[in-house]
């Protein structure tokens, strides 16, 4: 997994932003933000939350704890019949290994079916 340093810089550069742009967003100086991006200082929690909202990613992604970029809004998204993405994920994670494997196999088969149906 990538480090917080790599993630912060990558997200900023992907949007063609300068360090000063992000510094202004989180209410600090460009010099201080540079320290966050270089690993010389720890990013304050307030700034972490602002950046997660700005980039629409999770704080765990910014901290390098997961490869999943999806932020909180994705977990609250309605999947079907009042079930959210987060609820679906929790349901799958509550299963034993065999149950999880069955869910993954079903998802794989469903993807194949939809791919096949598109060809018709």
Image (tube, grey):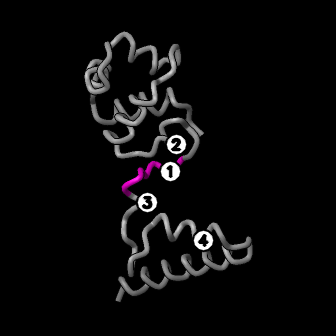
* 26 or 33, nearer to the observer: 26
The CA span between labels 4 and 2 is 20 Å
Q: Are marks 4 and 2 in contact (CB under 8 Å)?
A: no
Which residue in the protein does label 2 denote?
60
Which residue in the protein does label 4 denote?
92
Question: At which x and y percent is residue 61?
Answer: 50, 42
Question: At which x and y percent is residue 2?
Answer: 56, 36
The CA span between labels 4 and 1 is 16 Å
Q: Specify the quadrant that holds the N terminus.
A: top right
Which residue in the protein does label 3 denote?
75
Sequence order check, earlier mark of 4 and 2: 2
Residue range of the region highlighted in magenta in the rendering: 67-73
The CA span between labels 3 and 4 is 14 Å
- Counting other residues with Cα less than 10 Å from the Cα at mark 4, is it few (<14), some (14-19), or many (20 or more)? some
Residue 68 shows which numbered tag?
A: 1
- Of helix, strand and loop, which one carries label 3? helix
Q: Specify the quadrant that holds the C terminus.
A: bottom left
Which residue is most to the bottom? Answer: 120
Sequence order check, earlier mark of 3 and 1: 1
Viewer-side label of 4, 1: 4
Residue drawn at point x = 34 percent, y = 42 percent: 53
The CA span between labels 1 and 2 is 8 Å
* 66 or 53, nearer to the observer: 53
- Counting other residues with Cα less than 10 Å from the Cα at mark 2, is it few (<14), some (14-19), or many (20 or more)? some
The CA span between labels 3 and 1 is 11 Å
Magenta region, main secondary structure: loop
The CA span between labels 2 and 3 is 13 Å
């Amino acid at each position: 997994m990538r480090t917080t340093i790599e993630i912060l810089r990558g997200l900023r550069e992907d949007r063609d932003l300068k360090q000063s742009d992000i510094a202004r967003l989180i209410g600090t100086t460009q010099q201080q933000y540079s320290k966050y991006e270089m690993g010389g200082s720890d990013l304050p929690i307030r700034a972490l939350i602002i950046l997660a909202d700005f980039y629409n990613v999770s704080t765990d992604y910014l901290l390098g704890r997961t490869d999943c970029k999806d932020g909180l809004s994705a977990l609250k998204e309605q999947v079907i019949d009042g079930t959210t993405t987060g609820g679906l994920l929790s349901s799958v994670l509550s299963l034993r290994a065999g149950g999880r494997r069955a869910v993954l196999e079903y998802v794989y088969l469903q993807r194949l079916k939809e791919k096949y149906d598109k060809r018709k």
